[in-house]
Amino acid sequence: MFTPNASNSGLNIHPADPHNPLPLYYQVYADLKRLIRSGVLRPGDLIPPELTLCDLYNVGRQTIRSAILRLVDEGWLERHRGIGTYVLAPSNNAQRFFLDRSFSQQVEEMGKRPHSIVLKQSSGIIDETAPEPLQSQRGAPCLYLNRLRLGDDEPLGIQYATIITEHCPGLETFDFNTQSLYAILSREYHLIIARITHTFSAASASPHQAELLQTMPGTPLLLVKTTAFLENGEPIEHTLSYYRSDRFEFTVVHTL
């Protein structure tokens, strides 16, 4: 039997902030997930109705639906026609790795502490050798950043990033061992990542990659080519990421 949570007012909901660079639906999605993971909303609890959530989060109904749909897709909620939407018991969500958000957000949602080891960092200029999505920005200054990305102390991937620094001078002075690139761009430079594209292909671990990822040479890897764009449509970052495909499930959620 599904029973509603005792009091909507006792949920300690964090209303969406229109000045936050994160989309409104994502703010609602993240806050509802916080309530589930903290045990405020427990397995079997019905979440408040959509119209109630609209009032609590101060957003429109489509925003609420988009947030709920994403949680349903990820296995946190289940909808029953004529009954409502209720919280599911925990499953293997901690092992699911979603690619439609920053690395730090992904790893935190896996229940792990994200951090990095900078393997190489240097400054340069976008030229004919730059990745194709950045060719429109030839002549712009850039930062080359090669990092081993970890969740707790477990290597999850190797990333080779090219970041255009025309709108973020001094970016090279930040500590990328502990700080998120996207968080720095938003907090320090007020740059908002409005769109991210991914291209997927297969690869196998070279001896060097295998050593970094603590696996065997030839282990299957998932190669993800990522390009991030600003609100004005300009590309700002292109990254080649190599992830161990034998250990994690990779998922992309499209919210309409």
Image (cartoon, grey):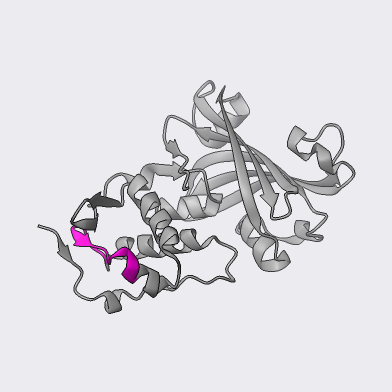
In depth, the one of 246 and 63 nearer the eye is 63
Decide if residue 38 is on the left or right side of residue 58: left
Q: Is residue 49 magenta?
A: yes
Q: Residue at x 81, y 37 (%)?
A: 135
Q: How many marks?
A: 0
Q: Which residue is farthest right?
A: 139
Decide if residue 43 is on the left or right side of residue 65: left
Which quadrant is home to the N terminus?
A: bottom left
Looking at the picture, does residue 254 appear above or below residue 52? Answer: above
Q: Inspect the magenta stretch and tell me whether residue 202 lies in it.
A: no
- Relative vertical location of residue 130 with respect to residue 236 in this rendering, above or below: above
Q: Which residue is nearer to you in this view: 111 or 128? A: 128
Residue 236 % position (x, y): 73, 49
Q: Can you see residue 112?
A: no
Whether residue 255 sits left or right of residue 172 in the image: it is left
- In the figure, residue 247 lies in which quadrant? top left
Residue 22 lies in quadrant: bottom right
Toward the left, the furthest residue is: 1
Residue closest to the far bottom: 9
Q: Position of residue 119 (x, y in %)?
A: 68, 44
The residue drawn where x is 43% and y is 58% is 62
Q: Which residues are magenta?
A: 41-52
Q: Quadrant of residue 203?
A: top right
Residue 37 falls left or right of residue 124: left
Q: Is residue 82 visible?
A: yes
Q: Position of residue 127 (x, y in %)?
A: 87, 37
